[in-house]
Image (spheres, rainbow, N blue to C red):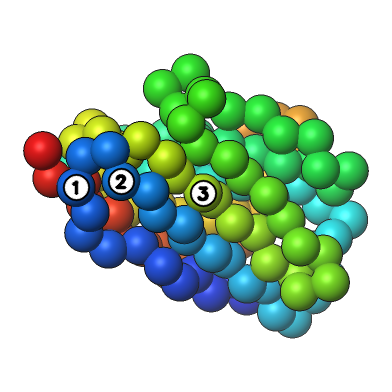
Amino acid sequence: QVHLVQSGGGLVQAGDSLTVSCAASGSNVSSVGMGWFRQPPRQDRKFVAGITSSSTTYYSDPVKGRFTISRDNAKNTVYLQMNDLKPEDTAIYYCTTIVSGTRTSYGHWGQGTQVTVSS
């Protein structure tokens, strides 16, 4: 059973950068895709970024060019570096195991990390 533990997040100002991390335990996730979703206040959870087992990355349009997803298989950890943050990036961010190359979660989710961007 995969257990995902997130860290990072917090309150920043518009234009700042922030990195959130997701460490996996219970199973080696190096052979599966990983992704990040976010849930803004009073909205549904939405796909943000994905990374395949071979480290090919893909992004949703709102974050393309500003966010970078990466993975360190030796540490069983996935990262989401967020640059030039905007107030509309405010959300709870979740990491998940993901069907490689898609936006479909396998159903293993991190506990969520609040990111708040003030204007």
Question: CA–CA distance between discs 3 and 1?
Answer: 15 Å
Q: Which residue appears farthest toward the top when viewing the image?
A: 61
Question: CA–CA distance between discs 3 and 2?
Answer: 11 Å
Q: Where is residue 25 in the image (x, y as percent from the top left)?
A: 70, 79
Is 39 situated left or right of 25 in this image?
Answer: left
Question: CA–CA distance between discs 1 and 2?
Answer: 6 Å
Residue 109 visible, this angle:
no
Question: Is there CB contact under 8 Å for labels 1 and 2?
Answer: yes
Name which residue lies at 63% across and 72% down: 23
Is 18 situated left or right of 90 in this image?
Answer: right
Q: Which of marks 3 and 2 is nearer the N terminus?
A: 2
* Residue 21 found in image quarter: bottom right
Dot 2 amino acid type:
Asp
- Residue linked to disc 1: 13
Disc 3 on helix, strand or loop?
strand
Q: Quadrant of the C terminus?
A: top left
Dot 1 amino acid type:
Gln
Q: Nearer the viewer, residue 71 or 50?
A: 71
Q: How crowded is mark 3: few (under 14 residues within 10 Å), some or many (20 or more)?
A: some
- Residue linked to disc 2: 16
Q: Position of residue 117 (x, y in %)?
A: 20, 46
Q: Which of 6 and 83 is in front in this view?
A: 83
- Residue linked to disc 3: 81
Q: Where is residue 108 in the image (x, y as percent from the top left)?
A: 60, 61
Is 26 situated left or right of 111 in this image?
Answer: right
Q: Which of 90 and 19 is in front in this view?
A: 19
Dot 3 amino acid type:
Gln
